[in-house]
Amino acid sequence: MKHRLLTPGIIAVLFVVQPLLAQEPAPAAAKPEAAKPAPAAAKTSYTPLRLQVTISRYQGDKKVSSLPYSLSIGMNGPRVQFRVGAQVPYATTSVNDGVKTPSYSYRDVGVGIDVSGQMMIDPGVYTMNINVTDTSVSSSSQIQGAPSITGVPIFRNFSTGGTVVLKDGQTTQLTTAGDPITGEIMRVDVTLTVVK
């Protein structure tokens, strides 16, 4: 069998092609991973509660008035605000070039209650911040010992605030204070009920 000689051109092609054939095939491109769904936001427990705030006035041991106010609140919920009352007009006088002109201004009277920071600190134990304001109007004849001007109303103001810790069905006294002018005792009681 005769051996045929390869021409130099063919030999060069073999040396170039053979290394290329010996290389391993390139790995296939990695498939992009499917986007993982974002973890669900943690749910905030919301416990519905009923809060009763009672504002009472006493003259000695005698209860003069007692007004309850009921509010729906929730643990870890938003701030709760309550307002009830009216705008009461009172006479004012303006002087312009020596001429007195009667006019009227208005002032808010009534009750305001704010509840915030409500949370459960232990199983079945709740805490919250409560602020109470009570503004009323009286005549000089109704308030003994108060300096007054005939025909001019007297505005009485009471405000208190603090933090309470309560269990279901429990009542606590937010504050007790005496009016230095009338001697009346103001008392604010708070009762908490868990809504089933």
Image: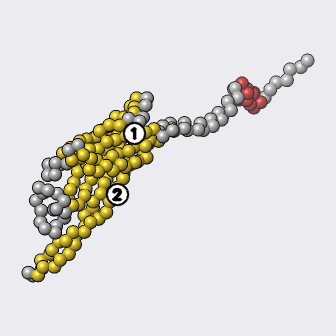
Of the image marks 2 and 1, the number of the one nearer the N terminus? 2
- Determine whether the residue tagged by mark 2 lies in a helix, strand or loop: strand
Name the one closer to the observer, 188 or 26: 188
Label 2 Cα crowd, 10 Å radius (few <14 / some 14-19 / many 20+)? few
The colour scheme is: secondary structure
Distance between mark 2 and mark 1 Cα atoms: 21 Å
Q: Outermost residue, front direction?
A: 62
| Residue 66 visible from this viewpoint | yes
Q: Quadrant of residue 117?
A: top left
Q: Is residue 114 left or right of residue 157?
A: right
Q: Residue at x 59, y 38 (%)?
A: 37
Q: Residue at x 59, y 36 (%)?
A: 36
- Determine whether the residue tagged by mark 1 lies in a helix, strand or loop: strand
Q: Residue at x 25, y 64 (%)?
A: 107
Q: Outermost residue, left direction?
A: 98
Q: Quadrant of residue 144?
A: bottom left
Identify the residue under disc 1. Answer: 192
Q: Where does residue 82 sit, x and y in percent of width and height? A: 36, 53
| Residue 84, label in figure | 2
Above or below: residue 50 compared with residue 108: above
Q: Where does residue 11 sit, x and y in percent of width and height? A: 75, 27
Above or below: residue 154 compared with residue 66: below
Q: Amino acid at mark 2?
A: Val
